[in-house]
Amino acid sequence: MFVSGLQRPLYSINLFCYAVDMKFFLTLVGLIFVLEGLPYVASPEAMRKWLRQLVNMEPSQLRLMGLVAMTVGFTLLWLVR
């Protein structure tokens, strides 16, 4: 199958898009690791204290925090994309 006006198969275009998408995805995953590790490097004592507080929180509070974080993230992605 060829794209009209081009003399190369359609699947080669799809493979190129897949490679670009995978590179972008891996870049995002790397950025997430950097951002997740930053507080532990910057202030390990404060992170230890904060993690102790997390253990004592009710599951409903943790779910609410997760839901708020996901909503903010999805909203940001929707606005940017």
Image (tube, rainbow, N blue to C red):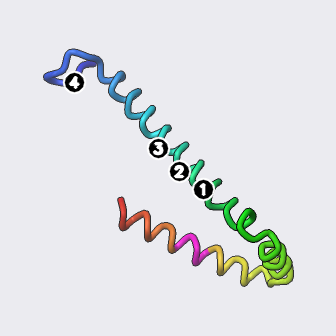
- Residue type at tag 4: Val
Q: Secondary structure at mark 4?
A: loop
- Residue type at tag 1: Ile
Depicted 47 relative to depicted 8: above or below: below
Q: Which residue does the numbered mark 2 point to in the structure image?
A: 28
Q: Where residue 11 sits: x, y (%)?
A: 36, 23
Q: Sequence order check: which comes first, mark 4 or mark 3?
A: 4
Whole-angstrom CA distance, mark 4 to mark 1, is 37 Å
Q: Where residue 61 sits: x, y (%)?
A: 72, 84
Q: Sequence order check: which comes first, mark 1 or mark 3?
A: 3
Depicted 62 relative to depicted 2: above or below: below
The numbered disc on residue 3 is 4
Q: Which residue does the numbered mark 3 point to in the structure image?
A: 24
Q: Which residue does the numbered mark 1 point to in the structure image?
A: 32
Q: Is residue 52 left or right of residue 31?
A: right
Q: Sequence order check: which comes first, mark 2 or mark 4?
A: 4
Q: Where residue 43 sits: x, y (%)?
A: 75, 71
Q: Is residue 71 left or right of residue 6?
A: right
Q: Is residue 40 left or right of residue 11?
A: right
| Residue plotted at (56% across, 70% down) | 70
